[in-house]
Image: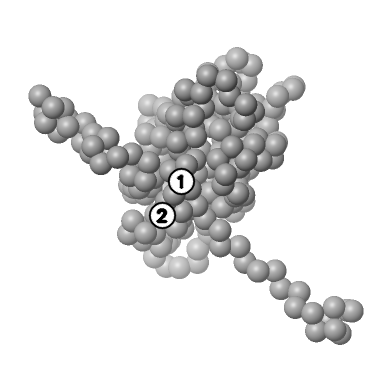
Amino acid sequence: DVLKEKRVDRKVKQRDRYLDETEIEKLMHFDLVERTFHQKPTHGVSDQGMNYVMLVLFTGMRKGEVANLKWEDVDFKEKTIVARNTKNGSDHYVPISKMIQWKLEAQKKVSDLKGSAWVFPRRLGDGPMTEPKSQLARICKATGIKFRLHDLRRTFATHATREGTSYELIQKALNHKSGSVTSSYIIGNIDMMRPVFDTVFLAYSKMYLDDEDYERLVDPEGSQETIE
């Protein structure tokens, strides 16, 4: 009432932070090069912490959806993930792109050490991990990029849009509810959604890889023929 009387603007500015091309390149370089080949790592970033952050970046899933994944909901054969008990009350099906698969396979090794049913088990006891605030802080410090977990979800949507993905498909990929007539026809068809996640994977990869490596990623058979 006091603030209202003094006419203080109480509106919270809507966040619009997302990672740009340079920041995505830095984050991927840190994950794929610095953490792998640095002989004496001092950043304190764990494999689980990094795998978690990269999965949020490459899936656009909510942080709780990723943290609460179980291995029974990951199907490597059909290349799908199912997030249960999501914010909008429905199961959320996510196609597995190449990077998502690589990160899940890396995390499987971590999870298997505890024999856990959770993709991201808590450090002590049974159950899923809580939000990895300390790991996120260490990643931000090591990369020089200041971001929140939800910024990664916004990053996914932003770069999917820049690659020409339709608004309706992006909404579906993010598991947003929509009351539009058009969206009612997009009913969890995993094959329809898969190109969205593959497009984002390629968009991020192009920011990180040089032209030759990118072409080899997109068309490995064609690149091999060129080499031969």
Amino acid at the residue labelled 2 = His
Quarter occupied by residue 226: top left
For the residue carrying disc 2, how many other residues have a C-alpha within 10 Å: few (<14), some (14-19), or many (20+)? many
The residue under label 2 is 159
- Circle 2 — which element? helix
Residue occupying the point 39% across, 59% down: 161
Does residue 22 sit above or below 120 in this rendering? below
Q: Mark 1 and mark 2: span between their CA atoms?
A: 11 Å
Which one is nearer the viewer's eye here, 220 or 95?
220
Residue occupying the point 83% across, 81% down: 4
Amino acid at the residue labelled 1 = Ile
Taking the image as shown, residue 47 lies to the left or right of residue 59, namely: right
Does residue 72 sit above or below 23 in this rendering? above
- Circle 1 — which element? helix
Residue occupying the point 40% across, 62% down: 167
Taking the image as shown, residue 120 lies to the left or right of residue 39, namely: right
Q: Are marks 1 and 2 in contact (CB under 8 Å)?
A: yes
The residue under label 1 is 24
Residue 61 placement (x, y as % from top left): 53, 46
